[in-house]
Image: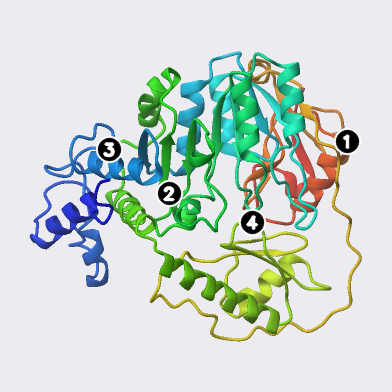
Amino acid sequence: MRDQTKMPLVERLDAHAKSCPISLHVPGHKSGAIYPDAWQKFLKWDVTEITGMDDLHHPEDVILEAEELLAECYGSKKSYFLVNGTSGGNLAVIMATLKRGEKVLVPRDAHKSILHGIELAGGEPIFLTPATNKEVGVASGVTTELLEETLHNHPDVKLCILTYPSYYGTTFNLQKCIRIAHDFGAVVFVDEAHGAHFFTSSEFPKSAVELGADVVVQSAHKTLPALTMGSYLHVVNDLPIFEKLAYYLQVFQTSSPSYLIMASLDAARKYAATYTAADVEAFWKMRARWIKWLTKNKFEVILPDDPLKIIVRKTGYTGYELQAIFEESSYFPELADESQVLLILPLIKKGIDFTPISRIHSPSKKEIAKEPYEMSAPFASGLALTYEEMHARATEFVFLDEATTRVSAETISLYPPGIPAIIRGESITEKHIRELKNIRTRHYQGGEKLAENYIRVFR
């Protein structure tokens, strides 16, 4: 095995910065020279494809070496740095593996970038309603029974996309799902945005790479110490269908990749690759302190499968109210929903301190009646219109309460996590309308006039 303590790109950038370079190239800040002193140290690393810095889209030197270290670290055939986030990787994988008119299985709670990729490829999506985790009340993967039944009904499916783990850190029997999909001849693509850290300890859930997926995309910036937009793509099984992957990575990524992001990906790989038993022990101790602190502050704590995630509730409070209480004390949760807030802990190493430093005051409140989680039976469904039909049709706005049975012309997602409440091309149901009414006062993406109680539909 190669020396995983090396950081080829980081080391090359550091040497360049220490040489006191005079920038006569882009970017325009000229190694930070026209910024205040506080910016200059790290902006010396913000270079372009000058001599010695290699090229992300045709790597031959330090970027190639860094990506080879990444592949060896995760156990893949080939790995790539991504600078346009997991979203860019999702688009590239789908375009490389799916032809126009081919069927693709996709969980209904997939990230919106997955849906964008399927639309761009012209695939025919078959949506699998995910099972609901009863304790957390969120979507948590597809059942093996639904997957097998759907593949029996659609044996010509070419691509099977799965999301693992969920945003809230819950998992499902991914290994069996992968085996079922492979038995039917489908390529398996796993969006493992929240699982880049799984391989660092046997006490964490197993990674999709280890469980046998064909291709996996991970958001290194979500759970490893990488900069925002930094992600990894792993080709686990070197199938002929992936021949166009490098091309589509150029299509969906900037031609001016950030060397700061790439350097952070190199450093994050080293950080994860050198994670030791002592580091694991330090993490568990830190996590125990947070759980104790939350309990002492009279919060209910729920622990999902991913140890980095902690779900917090309190009787009488919505998740949004809890979020405001946390933020008043300068603690900023990842997200909130009607019932809870989600906290994401860091993957600390021995010697790093991440301890809560102040109390949070949240007065006791009477329990409020809440709607029970909708535990509908999992099923498979498709779009009401093909993408070609959608492109050809005009649209109009209708009042939300009058939209039942109409076909939505927009995808609307509560953000975070970016999971659609309604997908462009779906027939609108009463359940969709209830969900849209719930999110219209929250932060969402799409929904041009949702705040005014209107939704865009196809005529």
Spatial CA distance of label 4 from label 2 is 25 Å
Q: Residues within 10 Å of mark 3 (few under 14, many from 20)?
A: many
Q: Earlier in the sequence, mark 2 or mark 3?
A: 3
Regarding residue 408, the answer to whether it shows in the image is: no
Q: Is residue 96 left or right of residue 257?
A: right
Q: Which residue is mark 1?
A: 402
Q: Quadrant of residue 227?
A: bottom left
- Quadrant including the N terminus: top left
**What amino acid type should be assigned to the residue bearing mark 2?**
Met
User: Would you name the residue on which mark 4 appears?
Assistant: 305
Residue 196 horizontal side relative to residue 425, left or right: left
Instruction: Give residue 447's position: percent from left, percent from top.
Output: 69, 42
x%, y% of residue 254?
A: 35, 37
Query: How many C-alpha atoms fall within 10 Å of the one at disc 1: few (<14), some, or many (≥20)?
Result: few
Give the camera-side residue of 362 and 176.
176
Q: What is the three-letter code of the residue carrying label 3?
A: Leu
* Viewer-side label of 4, 2: 4
Asked which secondary structure carries label 2, the reply is loop
Give the Cα distance between marks 3 and 1: 50 Å
The answer to whether marks 3 and 1 mark residues whose Cβ atoms lie closer than 8 Å is: no
Disc marking residue 229: 2
Residue 56 on image: x %, y %: 27, 38
Q: Is residue 38 above or below residue 417?
A: below
Three-letter code, disc 1 = Glu
Picture residue at 11% right of the left edge, 42% below the top: 51
Task: Identify the residue at horizontal 70%, vertical 34% (top origin).
Answer: 423
